[in-house]
Image: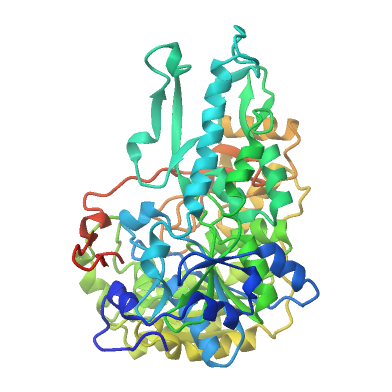
Amino acid sequence: MPVKKRRPVPSDIEIAQEAELKTINEVARDAGVLDEELIPYGKYMAKVDYAKVLQRLKDRPNGKMICVTAITPTPLGEGKTVTAFGLGQALKLRGKNIVNTFRQPSKGPTFGIKGGATGGGYSQALPMENINLHFTGDVHAVETAQNLCAAAIDASILHGRTPGDTHRNPLNIDPLNITWTYCVDVEARALRDAMIGLGGVANGYPRLAHWDITVATETAAIFALTTGLRDLRERLRRTVVAYTYDGKAVTAEDLHVAGAMTTLLLDAINPNLVQSTEGHPMFCHGFPFANVAHGNNSVLADLVALKLADFVVTENGFGVDCGFSKMIDVKCRQSGLKADCAVIVASVRALKEHGGAFHLRPGMPYAKVKEAAETENLPAVEKGCENLARNIAIVKMYGVPAVVAINRFTPDTDKEIELVRRKALEAGADGVGLSEGWVKGGEGALELADEVLKAVEKPHEMKFLFPDDAPIKDKIGTIATKVFGADDVDYSPDAAAKVKLYTDLGFGWMTVNMAKTHLSLSHDPNWKGVPKNYKLPVRDIRASVGAGFFYPLCGAVSTMPGLPTRPAFVDVDVDVETGKIKGLF
């Protein structure tokens, strides 16, 4: 085993740095990847040539896909990543051929509030520091491709068709109707809206531009949804970046930049192979945000993993209403992937919040709610289980078996755990298991693994909530009422106009990817439990034609986060004597 357990459990980075990692060649052999399919990035990381693997194993049946999701989360997080990794480790201990797939962390949250996203305790992905920072350069590749297209837009407005041509803006781009953004992978609220092109004609045409965090861009979504190089090139060809003065769509192909963007992503689309703290294989690839993008790791990572392994454990961003719903209605719809089981992670402290015991807002010190969160409160837990039951019901709507994972924290009492177990089964869960991967690694998720192994064998048929050819408003209304529990949808005039525009432009074939808060089933982060008797406000609708989805903006949703008063980067440094990173978590 690459890491030796000790008590009390050290910090995540201490555990990661104490681990005795397998070489990436050993991990590859364990995964069934051949030497000629491996592209090493140092001793402990590698890319895998997806095309070679898929061609070699094209006749092998796919493994089972297990999706790890959660109840509606709190700002603390409910341990979804650590549960997904612990489950993978437990399945490996049960002798199963298992690969985990997960998203690469964004440096925005890593240095902002949340910190890293490689699990925790004894259920981590390694090498943790590399994965949380630059890794194999995929985020840089996406960022460069996105910014190249943005620069091409401004150059097209400034120049004529040929050198010396005095007739500027040959594509007739309306500077007030540019939908493509610049990006950077840090939390920089000052760049959300910025005037560019100031200082004279040599600096371009002055306009109001917008920056997204890189992982919220359309290029990031395309990167994660593509099924291969030919598909990538087609998606970048059709992606709409602006509109003309007379309302016609302008594409990356019109700018003659789609080919260069594809070239920048050529190596990056190969999935990244790493390992867990217990040495089993994992693919870390793709990084779309889950509240504004579709929140799942890359299709290519899953396609490769499903050919290599009998069981693939993948994590969906945030709760069932966000990442899991988008896993089915966006990712599976476009790729042909199928989910065989959903694991819904719940924590007692989150159920207490949904039950009214306390309200922790983002950025609020945990000390203010610590007593309420850690004191036994059975009535609050029982009330909060209404949220758990609602999330179980959503999973069942998609035709997928649901297993509840209770991520146990030290203050949780046996009575609270048993109450959650009972309420989950009463709500229709196909099984319930404890998740204690943080303190025990795979051994702490063996009960959960056994429940999952039973659930994936149950007869089931995954289904979508709406047909591809449904009108745009019907698609939005279906998600709003069936998943979010709204009574109806309230469209702003701008949003209603966008519905007509996209229909007239022939974009009605696309699926829907709702952009809203992750802290509530509704659009309002303060509405806990199971919100009822409300209309879902849609203030705008944007079209990501290359990614193949609309994203209606529900409530206040930002595609560029801002740093808090005390960011996580404050604690990050390097020991100049040893070169070891410290403070990363």
Quadrant placement of the N terminus: bottom left
Percent coordinates x, y for residue 36 in the rendering? 65, 70
Image height of 211 relative to 335, above or below: above
Along the line of sight, the residue nearer the viewer: 361 or 488:
361
Which residue is painted at 26% across and 67% down in the image? 580
Front-most of residues 214 and 486: 214
Between 308 and 120, the one nearer to me in the picture: 308
Give coordinates of residue 13: x percent, y percent.
Answer: 30, 72
* 223 vs 248, nearest the viewer: 223
Q: Along the horizontal axis of the image, is 398 left or right of 342? A: right
- Residue drawn at x 66%, y 77% as measured from the top left: 308
x and y percentages locating residue 244 in the rendered image: 64, 21
Q: Is residue 537 visible?
A: no
Left or right? Give the position of 167 relative to 211: right
Q: Residue furthest top?
A: 166
Q: Is residue 123 above or below residue 297?
A: below
Q: Give the image quarter of residue 120.
A: bottom left
User: How is colour applied across the structure in the image?
Assistant: rainbow
Q: Is residue 447 above or below residue 26?
A: below
| Label total for image | 0
Residue 214, given in percent of the width and then of the height, sits at 47, 46
Rendered image quadrant of residue 267: bottom right
Residue 237 visible:
yes
Q: Quadrant of the C terminus?
A: bottom left
Residue depicted at x 43% and y 50%: 524
